[in-house]
Amino acid sequence: MRQQNVWRLMSRFNSFRRTNIILQHLRMSKHTEAAEDVLLEKKGCAGVITLNRPKLLNALNLNMTQKIYSQLKKWEQDSETSLIIIKGAGGKAFCAGGDIRAISDAIKAKQKLAELFFKEEYILNNAIASLQKPYIAFIDGITMGGGVGISVHGQFRVATEKSVFSMPETAIGLFPDVGGGYFLPRLQGKLGYFLALTGFRLKGRDVYRVGIATHFVDSEKVSMLEEDLVALKSPSKENVADVLETYHTQSKIDQDKSFILEEHLDKINRCFSANTVEQIIENLQQDGSPFALEQLKVINQMSPTSLKITLRHLIKGSSQTLKDVLTEEYRMSQACMRGHDFHEGVRAVLVDKDQSPKWKPANLKEVTDEDLDNYFKSLGSNDLKF
């Protein structure tokens, strides 16, 4: 009898211990998951950054941005690290942008996340642009907004047939930031202006054709490409370029398919060369082609304020340095956070998902030059500094 009681007690104790171990493990895995939203590893000659939030399409948060920046600086100084690779986990996205819902929520809760997030993100964008070592971004999958910022300023960008590029910020009351004011107006003709105002999506080889990517490789070959890059011995930029070129040359996917916007380039250049959004709209109306009318429909759904600040920013950015553009974008981002349209855009697209934002002001006429000036005003001692 006594033995039975001891046995019962022991089994109770064991199940209690087992439950405890399981709970501890769950707590740990939860902690690990939170801690490892970005993986930073040294492989061969390379520092490898893996964005590790696949369920959230590897959306960037403040923690990831800070970790990447700090590791980038270490690898830049490390003589054993010859190149840096950045990629996304999960096979669906490289990075679908910044975690803007978290930012909107934080502002409503009177937290300072927005001030910090944009500052750290733009400082990281600039660090990538000025990096002294080859930086290779595998933009294999969805690459939007903040994901563009941590790839496009690097020396090498590898697109695949799964790549989807877009700067869709005018649809959420924001503007194409992360240096968009620098790289977009430098694309061929007025293509960057078109992409910025409409949020048009480029896919696959077209991401390479417009110059967002420097190389195009079959998605299934990306891990082999990574192995070959990592195995290089103290490579120069030229050695890295040679390996990428070899893979690029071998890729035949969609090679004979024409660029999706090829037949519309003249229209885009003609319609989007105006200095005001109103004039662009008039140009599209006058053109009257199905393509022009489709773009008109898209533009009419965007935040009028976003459209106007975006166009002004791109025109200015076409002759500014990247640092000047990012400084201005920080001012603009903080003005957007104080305004109505960003929070309304996040609500309509990400929270309620009714896709029916109520913009204020509701039309272009009501967005005055004075309103616009406020988005570009210096923040004094709070301005972005590099």
Image (cartoon, rainbow, N blue to C red):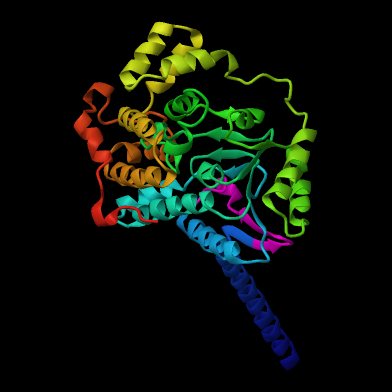
Please provide percent x and percent y for residue 364.
28, 23
Seen from the viewer's position, the closer of residues 183 and 10 is 183
The residue furthest bottom is 2
Is 107 magenta? The answer is no
Is 54 magenta? The answer is yes
Kindly indicate the quadrant of the structure image that contains residue 43. Answer: bottom right
Up the image or down, 94 lies above or below 25; here it is above
Please provide percent x and percent y for residue 363.
27, 23
Please provide percent x and percent y for residue 129.
52, 49
Relative horizontal placement of residue 115, taking residue 186 as reference (left or right): left
Up the image or down, 151 lies above or below 176; here it is below
Relative horizontal placement of residue 261, taking residue 327 as reference (left or right): right
In the rendered image, the quadrant that contains the C terminus is bottom left
How many numbered marks are there? 0
Residue under the point 38% across and 12% down:
283
Please provide percent x and percent y for residue 297.
42, 17
Seen from the viewer's position, the closer of residues 378 and 29 is 378
**Magenta stretch, residue numbers:** 41-60
Seen from the viewer's position, the closer of residues 23 and 171 is 171
The residue furthest left is 370
In the rendered image, the quadrant that contains the N terminus is bottom right
Residue under the point 36% across and 47% down:
327
Kindly indicate the quadrant of the structure image that contains residue 360. Answer: top left
Residue under the point 48% across and 36% down:
183
